[in-house]
Image: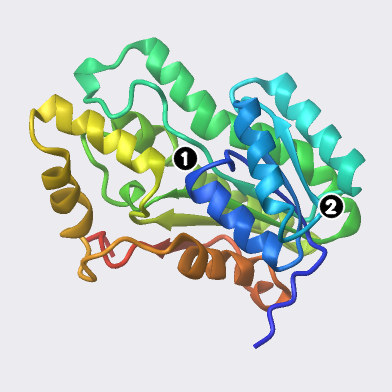
Amino acid sequence: MNVDINGKRVLITASTEGIGKGLARTLSREGCKIIITSRNEHKVKSTVEELKKYNPEVYGYVSDLTNYSNLEALVKFMLEKIGGIDVLIFNSGNPPSEPSYFDETSIEDWEYSVKLYLLSAIKLTKLVLPYMKSQRWGRILYLSSWTIKQPQRIFVLADVSRSSIVQLTKILSKELGSYNITVNTILMGSFETEGAKRSLKKLAEKQKIDFEELWKKEVIERSPLKRTGDIEKELGSLIAYLISDYASYITGSVIQIDGGTSDAI
């Protein structure tokens, strides 16, 4: 099977490290025209420089997902640089106060979390849809976690704030199918990223246990495969397939790639 996605115009948010960067690397190798984003200007510049080794049409924009005017400027930048948008891959980091239990959170934590995980996804979707509709083709992928199906108390902000994306996915798939626009949510398991390690280190400090011991217990041992996933080979290949024409009959779906971690059906 030759999954031809060469020339697809792709926006990947939160893409200068971890999951987002790994996907940007995979898709740039496949010939996609890519816009990467981050709040950190240095990371944006260095990531663009790295990815241009695979594909000259990779561009970066400094943008904060919780700043709506930033998102408007981001989409405008994309239109100017690569002439449109075919694929939105919505990825995000974690709120500063995560991981945390419910009693440890403030209403300000909740406001930030909902804006980061849900409202920014809605805002970006609204911004890109007119262009996808006009060309009658598009792919929208929301990256989330297996914990949407099996919530974890220590990640109360993330698990509650982004669970609504599943409902949004189903509703949008009904509205956009006639435009050949598919909408899906990806529930990811554990991948060895800087963000995942930062979260677990904070949790290890809370619980006063060794980080390596916690990583083994909460990440490695949870999966029947006893390992983390490979961002580029496994997750990247799935994403490449989903944005291709081969996946045009897959929409409104919640697709799990978690190494069997979740116990939920």
Q: Residue at x 76, y 65 (%)?
A: 31
Q: Horizontal and vertical percent for residue 199?
A: 30, 34
Tags 2 and 1 in contact by the CB under 8 Å rule? no
**Is 182 positioned to the left or the right of 136 in the image?**
left
Quarter of image, res 214? top left
Q: Amino acid at mark 1?
A: Ser
- Is any part of residue 254 visible from this angle? yes
| Of the image marks 2 and 1, the number of the one nearer the N terminus | 2
Q: Horizontal and vertical percent for residue 42?
A: 63, 29
Quarter of image, res 94? top left
Disc 2: which residue:
133
Screen quadrant of the N terminus = bottom right
Vertical order, 78 against 247 (above or below): above
Q: Nearer the viewer, residue 46 or 71?
A: 46
Vertical order, 88 against 203 (above or below): below
Vertical order, 123 against 104 (above or below): below
Q: Residue at x 54, y 64 (%)?
A: 236
Disc 1: which residue:
164
Disc 2/disc 1 C-alpha distance (Å) = 23 Å
